[in-house]
Amino acid sequence: MANADAALKEAMTSIEGTIGVALVDYTSGMALGVVGGGKELDLNVAAAANTDVVRAKLRAMELLSLGDEIEDILITLGSQYHLIRLMRGRGSQGLFLYLALDKKRANLAMARHQLKRIESELEV
């Protein structure tokens, strides 16, 4: 099991094309940890803003009575992918991993696979 800092560093170094990664509490909108970002992307602002995305999608699923769970949410920009992975492990309710990728350097399928693995090993 990896702690949050180790998991975020692993995502940053092992997922090709990563711009930045954050662990976010979507009940408060606060980033619990960030790695990367910098001038290209303010991960604390992205964490707060994407909390609204998660809440809206959860609300929509409830209104539609879909009876399913969100694995991840993908936002595709002109030059980036933004991937939101809701955490399901013990003690991680209300948390998500946020990953920003450079579209030219990233392999989206591999990034999703690796983020899922990192999420499964993460102990909060």
Image (cartoon, grey):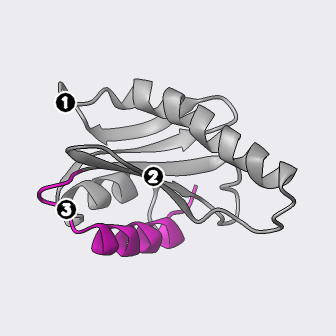
Sequence-wise, the earlier of marks 1 and 2 is 2
Q: Residue at the left extreme?
A: 105
Q: Picture coordinates of residue 59 (x, y %)?
A: 77, 44
Quarter of the image where one finds residue 77:
top left
Quarter of the image where one finds residue 6:
bottom left
Q: Is residue 121 magenta?
A: yes
Name the dominant secondary structure of the magenta segment: helix
- Secondary structure, mark 3, is loop
Sequence-wise, the earlier of marks 1 and 3 is 1
Up-down: is 102 above or below 111?
A: above
- Left or right of residue 86: residue 110: left
Alpha carbon distance from label 1 to label 3: 16 Å
Quarter of the image where one finds residue 25:
top right
Sequence-wise, the earlier of marks 2 and 3 is 2
- Left or right of residue 57: residue 107: left
Residue that appears at 38% across and 59% down: 7
Kindly check if marks 2 and 3 are in contact, taking CB atoms under 8 A apart as contact. Answer: no
Q: Picture coordinates of residue 40 (x, y %)?
A: 19, 30
Give the residue type that dot 3 points to: Ala
Give the residue type that dot 2 points to: Ala
- Secondary structure, mark 2, is helix
- Left or right of residue 79: residue 58: right
Q: Is residue 65 magenta?
A: no
Give the residue type that dot 1 points to: Glu
Up-down: is 6 above or below 116?
A: above
- Secondary structure, mark 1, is loop
- Residue at numbered disc 1: 40
Alpha carbon distance from label 2 to label 3: 23 Å
Residue that appears at 59% across and 29% down: 29
Task: Magenta stretch: give its range.
Answer: 102-124
Specify the label residue 106 is tagged with: 3
- Residue at numbered disc 2: 4
